[in-house]
Image (tube, coloured by chain):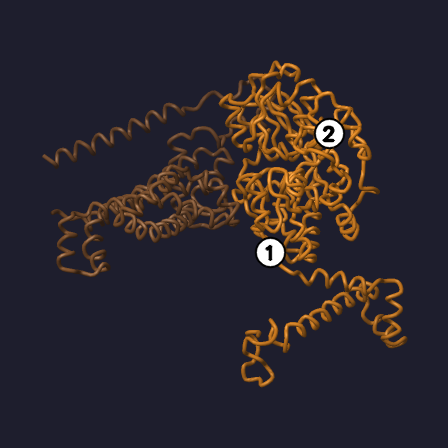
Amino acid sequence: MTKSLNFKSLLISVLLLCALLLGWYIATLPQAALTANVDPEYAALMGGGAVKKSGMPTPAEFGHTLRERLSDPFYDHGPNDKGIGIQLAYSLARVLSGFALAALVAIPLGFVVGMSPLMQRALNPYIQLLKPISPLAWMPLALYTIKDSSASAIFVIFICSLWPMLINTAYGVAAVRRDWLDVAKTLEVSALRKAFQVVLPAAAPTILTGMRISMGIAWLVIVAAEMLVGGTGIGYFVWNEWNNLSLTNVIFAILMIGVVGMMLDMMFGGLSRLVAYND
Amino acid sequence: MSGFDDPFDPNIQLSGKGCSCGRHASQAEHRQDEDARISRVVESTVMRALFPHDETRRNFIRAVGAGTALAAVSTFFPLSAARALAADRAALEKTDLKIGFVPITCATPIIMAGPMGFYSREGLNVSLLKTAGWAVVRDKVMNKEYDASHMLSPMPLAISLGLGSQAQPVAVAAIENINGQAITLHVKHKDKLDPKQWKGFKFGLPFDYSIHNLLLRYFLAEHGLDPDQDVELRIMSPPDMVANLRAGNIDGFLGPEPFNQRAVYEEVGFIHTLSRDIWDGHPCCAFGVSEGFAKTHPNTFAALFRAIASATDYAHKPENRADIIKAIAPANYLNQPIPVLEQVMTGRFADGLGKVRNVPDRVDFDPFPWPSMAVWMLSQLKRWGYLKGEVNYRQVAENVFLATDARKRLKEMGLPVPASNYARYTIMGKVFDPAKPEQYLKSFKISRA
């Protein structure tokens, strides 16, 4: 039963892909060039007959770009022209450092907020106020105060991935079952031991869910931040190719962003299965 | 320490102490020795030029003595000045520099100086960093992430006066390019060639403090349109201008090259007016440095100026343009199709209306930072309400546009310099006298001043 379900779903996926490629192919069929009665020099200056780099690429052109880019992902032709692998590595490094900083702050703070109803009430207004702020709204402020574009990008990742982790940690810690805490109290375990051996394992799945949401947000944010500050990274790559009005490369970058985002999400999915438990 | 030194030689110092080459006890001593060597090189060059045959030189020195020979040569060749000049080139305070640019053809001299070796000839190791927009350029210069940068020529005036940002002294060391912009309209407006029909149009512009904004406002006002009421002006980056033009979100733009030509090449727009037809020889982009950088690194700044000025002079000559296009087109720099750049740089281009036009000075390059141009920009910034109150035009212009410095250095390099720092300009038939900016300002019917 599952086997045939798997097969059917795969079949539909493949059919959808074929339909997409066919639609794309038809939509980008070559159109008539400049009419014949213009001055030949004028037609030449307008790129008459030549393949223009802009506009929607055909699937074949896209495939060519895909192969070319992926066959040499780590080339380095100077500060503004690096391979896709290097660009993704820059973006990932920024995301991971901002994310790690956020985890360092959010998880301990989430513990405090979750264990103490007083702190929860005191901090709640700030969390609610800061949570919905868009990453790009932070960017000018960060650039102005930090005075370093690379650090500003990391700060924006930090500030945006902080809240889901904080809220989920606080929720997970607050939702640990009362009777487990009562047992811990009866056994008179120390506060630290209670935190690490009772609360942390019980809250771990919720904390990881928070981290997974944060990672998704961080990956969304980095592209926008890098488009704004320029320099390196996948967001800069998108901006640079847009500057050349090269849609082929923009679509390629979008695909790469999707693939890497999916891989990050799968990684956290795997991690949360590791800490999951049934009671 | 040199790797070729014999480690068994008792006179050789293998430890990290001492100078950079290891031959001297201290860096100061090393520098002294280096200066002496540079002097020797200069003297040898001069003597070789004076006495092509070594036999003659040796006979001459034997006959009159070395001291007399030196004195004799010094009377007709300024040896000490040549030595000082060479030493000035040698002692750079900083050789690794970060220079920002926005990928448009206005940045040509700044960019080509990298791949064509103008920076390395001056002993500079420059990273050219492509930057996402003018506000980012401003912030990165103000934050000292960049040592110098490609800027729109009114930006240093705006930053120094604190318009749109905190005030911080930024100077124009040289003008990058003159002319080289255009008004491009959507192909659907082919029948609206008269600007009087443009009421209600939406126009794209690259930045508030740009020559583009000032020229477009001037152009519209001369045709009786109030740029703040009769049309809509929007700030956007040049590739967005082409895309928005295609989508019909804007009716036209006054933008930098190659995006006007790109709009024609994409068959979405036509070139209505070249900016040289509004003001022939107008400045566009500038080479900007913070005053702090120029003051703390005078020799580096001088070397940088020489590199940029010689690149600008090289770009001015039409016969070099083909090589320049090849140098600036790759993805690391402009990332643009060569046929588009060729039309921009040679001035033989398709105008989008079916004609081939030939305007060799469509884009030109001239480094001299005229304070009179700054006075014009200040008058227009005041005209449109960006700058309020009393303005000491001359003082601001001369503080920001470093004409005196540029004049001295260009002369040293043997490049032409104008006789004075102030010139009159004829802009759309109206004469601007830099001595009377207030009077000029009062002569406009449409004005916010």
According to the picture, the residue beneath numbered tag 1 turns out to be B125
Q: Chain of mark 1?
A: B
- Relative height, residue B136 to residue B245 (above, below): below
Q: Which residue is mark 2?
A: B279
**Residue type at the position of mark 2:** Trp
Which of the pair B224/B104 is nearer the observer? B224
Quadrant location of the N terminus of chain B in the rendered image = bottom right
Quadrant of the image occupied by residue B365 = top right
State the residue at coordinates (64%, 23%).
Answer: B227
| Position of residue B436 in the picture relative to residue A12 (left or right) | right
Above/below status of A34 relative to B363: above
Residue A226: image x %, image y %? 46, 43
Which is nearer the eye, B366 or B150? B150
Rendered hue of chain B is orange
Say which of B364 and A137 sits in front.
Answer: A137
Chain displayed in brown: A
Instruction: Estimate how packed mark 1 is, as few (under 14), some (14 to 19) or many (20 or more) residues with alpha carbons within 10 Å.
Output: some
**Of marks 2 and 1, the one in the foreground:** 2
